[in-house]
Amino acid sequence: MRNTYLKMVIYRVFVYSLLMLVLFGCGSENKSLSKLLKERNELVAQVKADSVVIKTLRDSIAMLSFPANQRLTKINDLLSVGNYAEAREEVSRLVSLFPESREAKSAPVLIEKINKLVAQKHAEEERIKALGFKGLKPSASTTIGYNKVVFSNISVGSVFTFDAYDDSYHYYTADRGNRYITAAMRITSEDKNPRLPQPALYSISGDTMKWEGNFIVRFTRWRDYGSYLGNYSDNGNDFSKVSSVNFKIGYEASEETVKKPYAIVLLKENTLLRQYERFDNPPVSYTGRVDYPYSLRLEDFTKEDSHYVVIKVANL
């Protein structure tokens, strides 16, 4: 309605301006011209005033569409992921827009909490800086978008086993002079056809990590031999049927690499795609590749917006 009204006002301004031109061209009296000019100026002023009102109303709608309780929830979410700078900005907006709200009255407590968390973060950064990569705290569990990823049973051996069924399993045997670093990876997803992450192995030398390669990702087990062959589906390996699926990961490294400091690193990206090839055994697999940088430094793990998680650090 207000937009229609503005269009009518603007149209009247245009008509008045046109009439002035006609009257001026025809030599009309100055009195009539002055009257028209006055009316036009009044309409222009009205348009400007109404534009301000409309902007104010729009700002109010935007503000009310994101009320104080939702802003408080966002602040707590930002704190949970360590985004303290943005959380502080949201507290300021909350107090500015809803100064009398119950949520705004909790601002001093929120600011004190943020200050403590920032101080703790700085202290942790200094501790890690003093210890180097040894100071990093490995995490066997992390969340990447719609996926929760949990690692367990990390080990080093000559064989990487996967795709088990009944009393059988498939395996890769490491070449002479090599070893397999393996682990179980359980993924719980909110998506029915998620992409998956892929860990990588990095060797550690001084203050730098060097990329060695990405881990192979395979299913842990199939219901039986028939489901492994693809004669019928296995609901336990299908995210459209279940929320959690078990995988095995493995990387073949030289014995020299395994004996020296190394780390299993996870880039927080979901990249691997589910593929179906009827005549493959098994017909279902996850393909693709996560692109890791050739080298990583300590700050790549400690900065606020870091996308890297250390799953395990060994031999430090």
Image: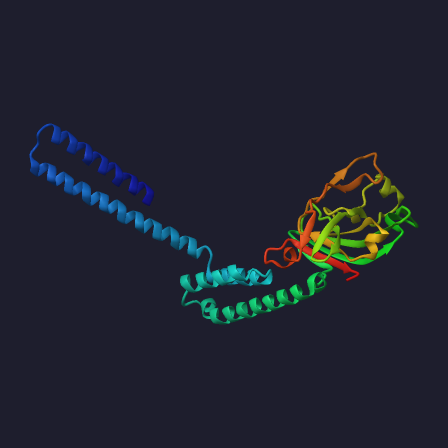
What is the quadrant of the N terminus in the image?
top left
Which one is in front, 280 or 270? 270
Q: Position of residue 43 (x, y in %)?
A: 21, 43
Q: Which residue lies most toward the front here?
A: 206
Q: Position of residue 50 (x, y in %)?
A: 28, 48
Residue at 66% x, 64% y is: 128
What is the quadrant of the C terminus in the image?
bottom right
Residue 189 visible in the shown view = no
Residue 220 falls left or right of residue 135? right
Tell me where residue 154 sits by quadrant.
bottom right
Residue at 50% x, 68% y is: 111
Residue 80 falls left or right of residue 239? left
Tell me where residue 60 sits by quadrant.
bottom left
Colour convention of the picture: rainbow
Residue 289 visible in the shown view = yes
Residue 196 falls left or right of residue 116? right
Q: Position of residue 143 (x, y in %)?
A: 67, 56
